[in-house]
Image (spheres, rainbow, N blue to C red):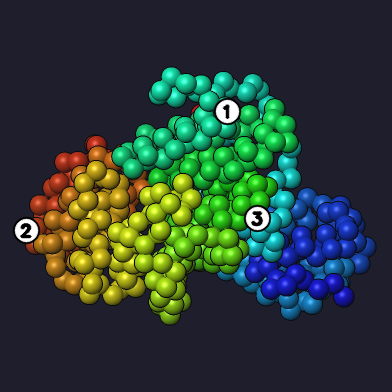
Amino acid sequence: MTSPPPGGPLLLGPLLTQLRLARGWSQRRTAAELCAVAGVPTLSRHEVSRWERQVRVPGDFWLRWLAVVLAAPLELLTDAATSARRLAPPPTGPTGVARSRAALLALAQRWRADPRAELLVAAPGRLAGPDVPGGGFEPAPPILSDGAARSPEEAYAADLAGLRRLDDLSGGADLAPLGTDRLRRVARALPRSGPAGRRRLLPLLAEAAQLAGWLAADAGDPSAGLDAYRLGLRAAAAAGDPALAGHVLGSASHLLADAGDPEGALLLARTAHAGSRRWASPGLRALLLHRVAFAAALAGRPEAAGQALRAADLATTAPAAGHEPSWLYWLDAPELTAMTGRTLVALGRPRRVEALLAGAARERGRPRRAAVYGGWLARGYLQLGEVELACEVAGAALVDAIRAGSPRASAQLTEVRRGLAAHRRAPAVRRHMTLVTTTRPYLPRPPSSGRVRDRRR
C-alpha cells in the first residue's frame, strides 16, 4: 500500500497528486484505472485534473475507487475530501475568485510537503495567466535617477524597491497597474536569460508577483491578487527561497482574511509558517504568526489566536535592523503592536485597543495604514461602548482611505458603519453618516468587471 507523505497534505487535491506520482502514473493512466475497476467508461483525465486542482471534489463513489487504485486508506481520502469541502468558497462567490483560490490552496499544500520542490513546471515563457504574457522582447533596463545604467537585475530590483516605497503613500487603485507592469517586465526577461541570469531573476520574479498581488488585493481585485500570488509561490520555490515563499503565502492569507474567508486564510497562514520557519528571519516569523493569529480570530478560534500571538511575541519584540529581507523593510515594532490590537478586536477583547492601535491609526505620512488600523480602532471603541470616539476615529480613517486611494481600506469601514447602525439616533453617528454621504463620490472603488477583462487582454 502506498503511504502518503509524512504529515500528509490537508486537502484532497494535493494528496491525490502525491499518491498518483508515487505510482508513476499520468492523469490519463489514473482515469483509465478508475474506469476499469468501477466499470464506468466515461471518466476522463480532465476529471482527474479537476480533482487534483480542487475545482471539484469527488463524491463517495469515486473516493472508494480512488482508494482501491491508489492503494490508499479510504479514511485518509475521506478526511482530506471533508477538509477540501469545508474550505470551499461560498457558492455565491465570483467564479474566477473561487478557481484562483482553489488553485492556490492546492499549490500551497504541494509546497508545504516539500518547500524546496521545483514548482515552476511551466516553461519560463508561460509562467502565468494572461496578466503575465510570456515571450516577446526583453525590455531595456531602466536608467536610475543618478543617470547610470544598471544590469537588468539591478534595475528591476531598484524599480521594485521604488514601487514598494510608493505603496506607503498611495493605494492599489493607483498602483495596481504599475505592479502588473513590473511583473510583466521581469517575466518577459526570464525566457531570454541563461542559467545564471535565471537564478538572479527568479527571486525578483517572486518579489514582483508578491507586490503585484498585494497591490491588486488593495485595489479590490482578489482574483488577480491570488493569481499573482500563485506565480510568486512558484517562482520563490524555483529560486530555492522558502522564506520568500512563506511571505507570498502570508500575503495571500491576508487577502483571504479581508475577503471574508477566514478558514482559507488560516490554512494559508499555517502553511506559510510551517513551511518557511526554518529559513525565516525573526521578523518574518513574527509576521507569519500574526497572520495565523488574525485568521484564527476571524475564524472564531480564540485559543489558536492567543497561542499564535504569544509565539509572535517570543519570536521577536522588533525586527533587527539590517537582518531582515529588503522586502520586509516596512515591518517595525509599531506595526507588530497594531497587528496585535487588530487581532484582539477581532476576538472581542478591546480593553487595550487604544494603547495598541492609536499610534498606527493617527500616524501621518502613511494614509492607508492609518485608515486600516483606524477602522479597527473604531470597531474596538464600539465594543467598549465609546460611540463618539468610534465616530471620530472612523471619520479620520475615511479621509485617510480617500487620500490613500485604497478600496480595501474603504471597504473595511463598512463594518464600522454596520456597528454604528444600532446608535443611528446619536448626534455623533448622524454627523458621521453625513460625512459618509458627502465623501461617497470620492471613495476609491474596486475595478469593474469590464476593467478587469480589458486589462487581461
Please tell me which of labels 3 and 2 falls first in the chain. Answer: 3
Left or right? Give the position of 340 relative to 441: right
Q: CA distance from mark 2 to mark 1?
A: 59 Å
- Which mark sits nearer the N-terminus, 2 or 1? 1
Mark seen at residue 152: 1
Q: Quadrant of the C terminus?
A: top right
Dividing the picture into quadrants, the one containing residue 382 is bottom left
Amino acid at circle 1: Pro
Nearer to us of marks 2 and 1 is 1
Identify which residue is drawn at 58% across, 39% down: 205
> Which residue was labeled with disc 2?
427
Image position, residue 29 (x, y; %): 89, 55
Q: Is residue 87 visible?
A: no
Q: Are dots 3 and 1 in contact, CB under 8 Å?
A: no
Three-letter code for the amino acid on which mark 3 is drawn: Leu
**Residue sitting at x 6%, y 58%:** 427
Please name the residue that numbered disc 3 is placed on. Answer: 107
Kind of element beneath mark 2:
helix
Report the side of 338 relative to 137 (left or right): left
Front residue of 375 and 338:
338
* Disc 3 versus disc 1: nearer the observer: 1
The correct choice, above or below, for 224 with respect to 24 in the image is: above
* CA separation in Å, label 3 and label 2: 51 Å
